[in-house]
């Protein structure tokens, strides 16, 4: 019996060649996900609020000559101890200097000093803690015993002792703050390294014959930086308070350079002239608030559980 050719419209052919095509989805990249942006902002609201506050003070650092209404060092004894007014927004001090302008210019001293200290203690403490945790032995023992010895003293007392011993100046004040704060970062980094060095990928790198130094800088340190970043953002406010305290006691930058701690020291005896110490204190408060909010936002953002 001769076989009949199948028709192109045969049901067998139509069934076998039928392909279920996926429904075409709208192009999600062609429009802005406004709802997603607001959801991200709500989830990380402390981070963005802190960045706005710090951005404001950063603008004061950069554009202080444009924002200040008077010369911060100019004395006007005829207008000394004047209350806040339209001419002097934050009033004047006992030498007739404009408090608003001194607060603005004080941002150029106080804020960079705190940032420099936190960068130095993060780098120094992280490297020492990484060496102590990764290599251990005699070197690690000496580093951690030195850290324990430093932490045995109250931070502010030890900083005051060091600053008074080496002399009052901006550089000595920053050096005293670094000496007091590095052990905290060393201990945190050491605890991170002790956990990470036992991970499987570190063991695999050793099995391939990778040098220990390369393992430390390529595999261990990049995975241990997150807690230190959060701590650094949180500590900037505390370091600012420590630096201001040293200046308050006359162990920081020398007059007449405007600095928030020194300004509070000048106004603490002027109870009825409240504006002299109040506005520098508020500046310290808002900077600390900004860094605390940024630290909280970074913790939530970098936490894997929050991302899930």
Image (tube, rainbow, N blue to C red):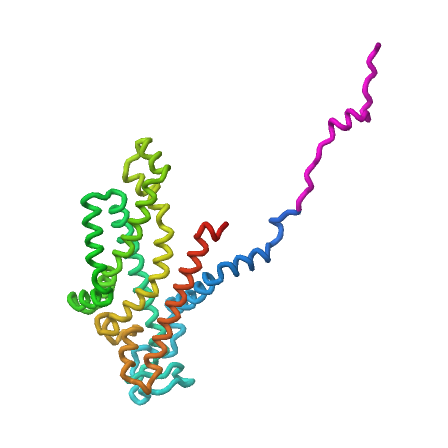
Which residue is at 37% across, 59% downward? 233
- 123 or 31: nearer the eye? 123
Task: From the top left corner, tell me how far across and down residue 84 is, in percent.
Answer: 39, 84
- Specify the quadrant that holds the N terminus: top right
- Picture quarter containing residue 151? bottom left
Q: Is residue 231 within the magenta segment?
A: no
From which residue to which does the magenta span run?
A: 1-25
Name, please, the residue furthest toward the bottom.
78
Q: Using the image, determine if residue 295 lies above or below residue 5.
A: below
Task: From the top left corner, tell me how far across and down residue 99 is, in percent.
Answer: 34, 79
Task: From the top left corner, tell me how far across and down residue 212 is, in percent.
Answer: 28, 38
- 307 or 94: nearer the eye? 307
Q: Is residue 18 within the magenta segment?
A: yes
Q: What secondary structure is the stretch in magenta mostly built from?
A: loop
Q: How many marks?
A: 0
Q: Using the image, determine if residue 61 lies above or below residue 203.
A: below
- 149 vs 185, left or right, is left
- Picture quarter containing residue 173? bottom left
- Picture quarter containing residue 204? top left
- 167 vs 192, left or right, is left
Task: From the top left corner, tell me how far across and down residue 63 is, in percent.
Answer: 39, 69
Name, please, the residue furthest toward the left.
165
Which residue is at 71% across, 32% downward? 19
Q: Using the image, determine if residue 103 lies above or below residue 46.
A: below
Which residue is at 43% across, 85% downward? 86
- 33 or 258: nearer the eye? 33
Which residue is at 31% across, 85% downward? 271
């Amino acid at each position: 019996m001769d076989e009949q050719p199948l028709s192109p419209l045969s049901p067998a052919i139509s069934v076998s060649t039928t392909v279920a095509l996926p429904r075409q989805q709208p192009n999600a990249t062609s429009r802005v996900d406004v709802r997603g942006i607001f959801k991200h902002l709500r989830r990380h609201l402390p981070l963005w609020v802190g960045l706005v506050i710090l951005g404001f003070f950063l603008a004061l650092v950069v554009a202080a000559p444009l924002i200040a209404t008077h010369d911060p060092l100019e004395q006007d004894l005829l207008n000394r101890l004047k209350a806040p007014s339209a001419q002097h927004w934050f009033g004047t001090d006992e030498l007739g200097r404009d408090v608003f302008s001194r607060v603005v210019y004080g941002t150029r001293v106080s804020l960079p000093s705190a940032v420099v200290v936190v960068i130095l203690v993060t780098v120094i403490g992280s490297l020492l803690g990484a060496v102590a945790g990764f290599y251990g032995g005699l070197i690690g023992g000496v580093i951690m015993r030195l850290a324990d010895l430093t932490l045995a003293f109250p931070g502010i007392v030890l900083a005051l002792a060091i600053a008074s011993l080496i002399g009052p100046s901006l550089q000595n004040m920053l050096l005293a703050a670094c000496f007091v704060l590095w052990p905290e970062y060393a201990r945190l980094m050491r605890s991170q390294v002790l956990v990470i060095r036992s991970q499987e990928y570190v063991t695999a790198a050793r099995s391939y014959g990778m040098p220990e130094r390369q393992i430390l800088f390529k595999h261990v340190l990049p995975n241990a930086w997150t807690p230190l970043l959060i701590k650094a953002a949180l500590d900037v406010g505390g370091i600012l308070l420590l630096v201001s305290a040293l200046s308050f006691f006359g162990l920081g930058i020398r007059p007449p350079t405007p600095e928030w701690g020194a300004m509070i020291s000048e106004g603490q005896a002027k109870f009825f002239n409240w504006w002299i110490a109040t506005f520098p204190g508020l500046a310290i408060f808002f900077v600390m608030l900004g860094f605390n909010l940024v630290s909280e936002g970074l913790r939530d953002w970098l936490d894997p559980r929050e991302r899930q």
